[in-house]
Amino acid sequence: SLMGKGLDLEITHVPTGKTLVFAAFITSFDDKYTASWGTTEAYGRMDTMPVYQSTRRSLSLGWEVPSFSTEEAKHNFKKLGLLEKFLYPEFEAGGLGATTIKSPPLLRVKFANLIMNADNGGGLLGYVGGFNTAPDLEAGFHVEGAMMYPKVFALSMDLTVLHEHDLG
């Protein structure tokens, strides 16, 4: 394991400041930059004139979470539940039982030098549409009473990065 060597995967829920740390059992990684261009027609020109619009960055990341004991499996299962809660915003109670979104569910993700804010070395700010979770059925389960905890489960996510500083 690369845990404890600065090579952990860290996911922080910005509204609450809670951070989850996973050992770096990375199974897939894709870092995608996409530039958007528009075009303008001009009389007498054979080619259109390109007009830059924006550049977007998105990351796809997959990792596995192994558990070598029932206690570790229970702990990892709790981490999975907290990770799922990271998809929800922070609410502020209003009058008459109404609630208002106080903070959107933004995340900061850091993994060594591959996923980090180049300006300050912290995590990249962004949002995810969800997490995919799949227990490894071949690896089996730790069983305690009527409760089943996967020995290994795979996680994946797509992070849309929000730029916090000027690039280029």
Image (spheres, rainbow, N blue to C red):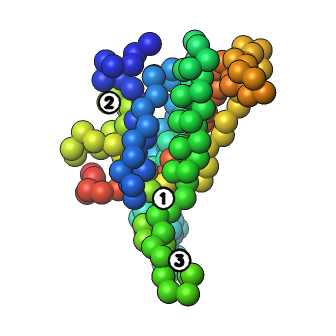
| Rendered position, 93 above or below 34 | below
Measuring 64% from the left and 28% from the top, which residue is drawn there?
A: 154
Would residue 72 appear left or right of 146 to someone viewing this image? Answer: left
Q: Say whether residue 50 is visible.
A: no
* Percent coordinates x, y for residue 53 in the rendering: 43, 66
Amino acid type of the residue tagged 2 in the rendering: Asn
Residue kind at label 1, given as amino acid type:
Pro
| Contact check, label 1 and label 3, Cβ < 8 Å | no
Q: Nearer the viewer, residue 111 or 65?
A: 65
Residue located farthest toward the bottom when viewing the structure as drawn: 96
Secondary structure at numbered mark 3 = strand
Q: Secondary structure at mark 1?
A: loop
Task: Spot the residue most to the left.
Answer: 120
Q: Point out the frontmost of discs 1 and 3.
A: 3
Marker disc for residue 7? none
Q: Which residue is mark 3?
A: 99
Q: Earlier in the sequence, mark 1 or mark 3?
A: 3
Classify mark 2: helix, strand or loop.
loop
* Residue linked to disc 1: 105
**First reached walking from the N terminus: tag 2 or tag 3:** 3
* Amino acid of disc 3: Thr
Position of the N terminus, as image quadrant, is top left
Please give the label number shown on residue 113: 2
Q: Is residue 120 left or right of residue 141?
A: left
Query: How far, Cα to Cα, is label 2 from label 3?
Result: 39 Å
Rendered location of residue 25, percent (x, y):
51, 20
* Residue density around tag 3, few if under 14, some if 14–19, many if 20 or more, within 10 Å: few
Front-lying residue, 19 or 25: 19
**Where in the figure is residue 29, as x and y percent of width and height?**
52, 31
